[in-house]
Amino acid sequence: MVSTYIDYNLLTRDMKTSLQRTAQQTLVARETEYYKANIGNVTSIDEFLGDYRLYAYAMKAHGLEDMTYAKAFMRKVLESDLSDDNSYANMLTDERYQNFARAFSFSQSTEVVQSGAQEDALIGLYNQTIANVDSKMAEETRYYDTMMDTITNVDQFLQNDRLRSYAFRVFGVDEKYFNFADVRGALVSDLNDPNSYFNTKFEPALTEALATKASSDQALSALSSRVQSQSRITAIDALMALPETSDEDKVTLQAEKTTLQNNIATINAAFPEMTSNIDAYAGVEAEISGLRTQMADPDLTEAERAALQAQIDQRQTTLSTMKGVNFYAADLKTKQSESTATIGRLAVFKDLALMYDFAADGSVPAGGTAQAEDSRKATKEVYAYKAPRATTSVALLHKAYYEDTIGTITTVAQIKSDSRLYSYILTAAGLPSSTTVATLESILTSDPNDPASFVNTKGGEYNAAYKELRAAFNFQTDGTLAAGDKPQTAAQTKWTSDNYMVRYNDADEAADASLIKSFKSLMSVVSNVDDLLSDTKIMKLALTAVGLENEGDTVRKMKKVLTSDLTDPKSYVYTLKDDRYLQLAKAFNFNADGSAGVPMLAQAESEILNTAKSYVIEKSRFATEDEKTKATAESKYYSAEIEKIKSLDDLLSNRRLVDFVLVAAKLDPETVTTDYLRKMFEADPNDPNSFINTEPNTTIYKELVASYNFGNTGDLVRPEFGIQTKRGLLETEDLYLNQTLEQQRGEENAGVRLALYFRRQASTINTAYDLLADSALMQVVRTTFSIPEAMSTADVDIQYAYINRVLDVKDLQDPEKLEKLLLRFTALYDVENNVDMSGAQIILSGGGGGISADTLFSLSQLRLGGF
């Protein structure tokens, strides 16, 4: 027989090759292939436990072969929530059960419309989008200003998407549905040329629409005045008929009635057809009313009642062919609305003709530009005012206007009539936009020295603002200025502008905070895609965040986007070729039927838990309490941040996360660069000559890479397997091969099996108690340090102290020191042990002095208080 020392060295000199030879054995290869081919089809614990080959393979891999029979027990292990310290598996002292449960992910994938990380990301994107509004618009204005100097013809202008989009936004042209010929024709039109495109195609319709609107406005106003006058005359007649109405009052009422009658006469003369038709209609209505009054007589015979009803029906028929007040009101409002829309549509073309200076042939006049300086300035200002929210650029425009204008003001009335000044002052003072003009006038004309004045008695919560505002102006109580006074001193104007620049976006910020709060609250009750799409607040935030708020997309299109399969490059969202829709789809998790799905994460939830736990174990080994606390805090950071990772680049760009991952995988971050790790992720694990397969720590790196859901391009993909991740599958296969190798070698030489087992378990040994808890590990220690067998009967604390005298457990984490220890063990094993009847063989085979499966099972139940 080959010595333990030689056999162990031959195996571990190239452990990778040794394991490959084991994997190539017919039975091992067949069972491994069966496991890999079928584990992905399992969807439940029942299916897993019902397939004996799968179940037995996994049990052997995790060193639990002797517990394969205990399916009820293992079911409780698999059903455990490993994130709960009091769950079944976590309460068992043997960590093999926890490791077994961690290798699978039954019920650890949560279906949710939006994860916490997705919500934070979308809200963050919304905040970033609104914060970028001003800078984005400023950049577009800079581009417009620069490029307009280079434009030499109208086609060059229209073919530049950014310039065209800028102009269309200013002048209100619909980018999706505009008529190219009409826009181009307007741009090259000379409004003074009767034969220009605009004057021949649009001017007649515009003139007609203006006339229609003017006549409709006039007629509608007259109709309203006539109805009000008639109503008031009826009321006057009623008042004059009252006995208590005095003669003096009757004279006054009669004078008012005469004025109203004259007004009606004037309207009748101006609109004879309309008013005569209305009067005729009213006459028939009065006849019908009279007939109905007659029918109310209880003494009528059936024949008389029938005759009256016939007359009513006849007049109703006549009435249906006549035109009354309601007809004219509706007709005039329709004409008013249609003409207003026509004017607005055609005015766009007139503005384009007016604001650009292209010649009839589309060229720019010699020595000129496509747009004059004053027109360009006006265009840029309108663009700024088109911002969806208050921006710094617009605020500065308002500030400039205020400071240029306020010095010319001489009365409060002038401020009241200028909406820009009025709004600016309210904002500067921190008053709500609902503050009326009358209130502002009362503030500015109030006497601050009078305790009973407006600013000293009104305003409630805004009283302090009233007083500050009053102090910022110098108007007298009659709204004028004293001789030599200005409405504001330089200091007062500065106070107003400074406060305006601080407060100009307060309303938007409050609206944003309210929208975000509503979004969070409303998302908690959304359960499917229809719920999401039907909520305007949710969609407002989501669409604004990704820049789709102005697209006007249909619900049907949005539904197709949100239910697209992000792992299928042919799915609907990818056919749109617009990253904004892809961003929207990635912000939520919907299945094809619109139900809530599982988020696409860089790691499955079970893997996040595994990685975090592994990190804490590594960092807590031989650590102080403070270091353990920091390790736990870091694991929380990782668990939160990894949910935000959307690509391999995202992960590798965060060195804090990279270091965490390396430590969790038992790798030294100091020796692994980010580029080196990237090569591991980008290598083909199925190519035996790839970078990852030629690395000495192949298994560690393959399992690390497999624990993440990155595709070939580095983007997220859906996991391929159901109850087990790629890492879990690789780990199970590796453990199975190691167990098989150890068992087979143990049949020939138990010492080799003990050494291989110790070598594999060394990374999990934290204290001497871990050695004492495992009889196989302890035999290696006893042999290596010649500890008498009788020592095993001593008190545990004595054994613990003795082991610490002969062995520094920390050395087991040093590969060189560990290898020296095992070489010493193998050298001494054949001398100190009876190879033909080794205690190690008895221990590792489950017989002899080992703890039986039944005993292990019973002890676990005693600790937990039974099933």
Image: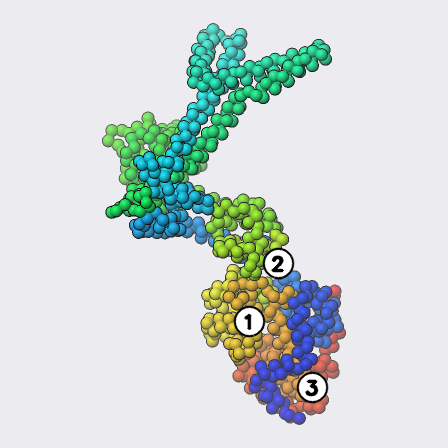
The image's mark for residue 340 is none
Image quadrant holding the C terminus, namely bottom right
Instruction: Identify which amino acid the numbered label 2 is placed on.
Output: Thr
The mark nearer the N terminus, 2 or 3, is 2
The residue lying at 54 percent from left, 77 percent from top is 693
Per the image, the residue denoted by label 3 is: 747
Q: How would you rate the neighbour count of disc 3 (Cα within 10 Å): few for under 14, some for 14-19, many for 20 or more?
A: few
Q: How would you rate the neighbour count of disc 1 (Cα within 10 Å): few for under 14, some for 14-19, many for 20 or more?
A: many
Image quadrant holding the N terminus, namely bottom right
The mark nearer the N terminus, 3 or 1, is 1
Tell how many labels: 3
Q: Nearer the viewer, residue 137 or 515?
A: 137
State how the image is colored.
rainbow
The mark nearer the N terminus, 1 or 2, is 2
Left or right of 56? Residue 809 is left
Left or right of 360? Residue 639 is right
Per the image, the residue denoted by label 2 is: 110
Q: For numbered disc 2, what is the local secondary structure?
A: loop
Left or right of 827? Residue 389 is left
The image's mark for residue 704 is 1
Q: Is residue 482 visible?
A: yes
What is the quadrant of residue 263 in the picture?
Answer: top left
Residue 824 in the image: above or below residue 739: below
CB under 8 Å between discs 2 and 3: no
Instruction: Identify which amino acid the numbered label 1 is placed on.
Output: Leu
Point out residue 843 in the picture as x, y percentages from the top left corner: 70, 82
Q: How would you rate the neighbour count of disc 2 (Cα within 10 Å): few for under 14, some for 14-19, many for 20 or more?
A: few
Instruction: Identify which amino acid the numbered label 3 is placed on.
Output: Glu
Q: For numbered disc 1, what is the local secondary structure?
A: helix
The residue lying at 37 percent from left, 30 percent from top is 441
Point out residue 303 in the picture as x, y percentages from the top left corner: 71, 12
Residue 741 in the image: above or below residue 113: below
